[in-house]
């Protein structure tokens, strides 16, 4: 990822970053639990999103010449973590689909025309994105995708099916991933894939909402593409090298998910701490018992460890030139953070007892939301596969 400002050495939490975190906390304070329950039930988070735009958060990593703040992923990940820690449930998904899929991808690989047209509107909160990568018969095996773009003069005709695509219904543009060469025609199976800037509301694209039980601000869809025409000017980056370019989007995507998991995990444990101080059974607060104290203490320390790994990974996104090293640490951070975050919410539900299953106490929605993080983006099994193969040098297992 290319940034215009290097991050400080030794993960220094500067006064500037303190101000950014405080701004995020101030924004979050205006939106209570009921607001986020309403968002999970289908309400558009327009007021919150505009506040984030006005604070410069949506353009955090966008260069200043395109209306952004010219900061790094170091700052962006801290924004998402802080908002999540203050109770903004699912905010990491909002930032992933637009700020990451749109802002980071176009900043790194967009043409001058694409950047000039889209990035200023994205920074202002007037432009939303989605990404269509996952397919029913490919899943994590992205090079095995069937969606194909056949060249026809200066256009491509695209056909295929995508699944579990977030936020299609509100997106102005779609980052569409398709093969432009068949697998048997390229030296490596990861070649021959191209990124396109597509219109999700074109007549050739249909989408159907999937019925999920996860309280998130982004709905999920199956997308059918039948004869969609993309001009060659809609290609993002280099034709045929899309998967390699996508790594600079996917690693930040995973780390924003990690930031959300750490933040929500902390928020859930704080709620558990408050409840344990107030709830009395057998004439004393339940928090006086080690059976309640120890799980909270254990998982708070695990969240702190995940936070430190996340901060290292964010620093490497901005400063480490070797993409393999960036990928290694991103996968480790995503694994540790999403597991620690979900485990923390599980402890919070347990501390609340029966009340933990009431939406009035919020922790059950946090439990459901963080469970998603162990599956997407990138399952915990695939994170372990990557660590085993690329960090430890073990034989490929999948």
Image: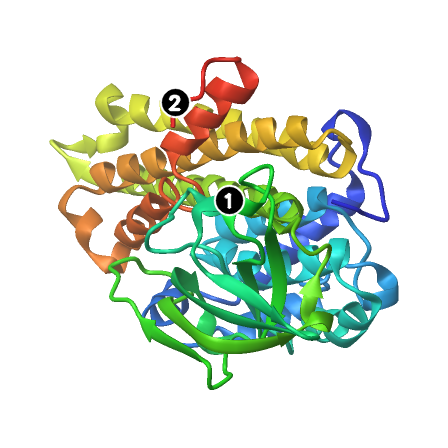
Residue 75 visible in the displayed image = yes
- In the drawing, what numbered circle is on residue 397? 2
Closer-to-camera residue (296/260): 260
Where is residue 363 drawn, in percent x and y?
30, 49
Where is residue 280 drawn, in percent x and y?
19, 38
Where is residue 203 drawn, in percent x and y?
47, 86
| Image vertical order of residue 124 relative to residue 266, above or below | below
| Image vertical order of residue 335 relative to residue 126, above or below | above
| Cα separation between marks 2 and 1 | 22 Å
**Quarter of the view holding residue 361:** bottom left
Identify the residue under disc 1: 184
Closer-to-camera residue (84/61): 61
Mark nearer the N terminus (2 vs 1): 1
Q: Secondary structure at mark 1?
A: helix
Q: Taking 54 as reference, is 164 left or right? A: left
**Neighbours of disc 2 within 10 Å: few (<14), some (14-19), many (20+):** few
Q: Which of labels 2 and 1 is toward the front?
A: 1
């Amino acid at each position: 990822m290319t940034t215009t400002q290097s991050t400080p050495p030794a993960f220094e939490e500067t006064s500037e970053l303190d101000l950014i975190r405080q701004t995020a906390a101030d924004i979050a304070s205006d939106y209570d639990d009921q607001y986020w329950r309403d968002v999970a039930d289908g309400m558009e988070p327009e007021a919150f999103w505009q506040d984030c735009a006005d604070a410069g958060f949506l353009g955090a990593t966008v260069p200043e010449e395109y209306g952004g703040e010219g900061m790094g992923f170091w700052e962006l990940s801290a924004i998402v973590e802080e908002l999540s820690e203050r109770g903004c449930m699912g905010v990491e998904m909002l930032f992933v689909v637009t700020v990451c899929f749109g802002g980071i991808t176009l900043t790194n690989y967009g043409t001058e025309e694409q950047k000039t047209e889209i990035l200023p509107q994205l920074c202002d909160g007037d432009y939303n994105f989605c990404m269509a990568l996952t397919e029913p018969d490919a899943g994590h095996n992205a090079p095995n995708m069937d969606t194909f773009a056949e060249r026809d003069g200066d256009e491509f005709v695209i056909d295929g099916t995508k699944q579990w695509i977030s936020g299609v219904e509100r997106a102005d543009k779609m980052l569409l991933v398709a093969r432009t060469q068949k697998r048997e025609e390229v030296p490596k199976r990861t070649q021959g894939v191209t990124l396109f800037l597509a219109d999700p509301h074109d007549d050739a694209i249909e989408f159907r909402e999937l019925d999920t039980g996860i309280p998130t601000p982004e709905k999920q869809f199956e997308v059918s593409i039948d004869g969609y025409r993309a001009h060659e000017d809609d290609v993002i980056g280099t034709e045929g090298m899309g998967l390699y370019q996508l790594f600079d989007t996917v690693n930040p995507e995973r780390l924003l998910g990690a930031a959300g998991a750490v933040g929500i995990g902390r928020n859930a444990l704080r709620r558990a701490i408050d409840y344990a101080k107030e709830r009395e059974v057998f004439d004393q607060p339940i928090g006086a018992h080690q059976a309640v104290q120890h799980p909270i203490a254990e998982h708070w320390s695990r969240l702190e460890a995940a936070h430190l790994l996340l901060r290292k990974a964010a620093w490497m996104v901005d400063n480490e030139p070797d993409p393999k090293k960036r990928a290694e640490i991103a996968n480790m951070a995503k694994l540790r953070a999403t597991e620690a975050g979900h485990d923390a919410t599980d402890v919070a539900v347990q501390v609340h007892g029966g009340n933990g299953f009431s939406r009035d106490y919020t922790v059950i929605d946090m439990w459901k939301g963080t469970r998603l993080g162990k599956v997407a983006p990138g399952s915990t099994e695939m994170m372990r596969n990557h660590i085993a193969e690329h960090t430890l040098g073990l034989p490929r297992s999948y």
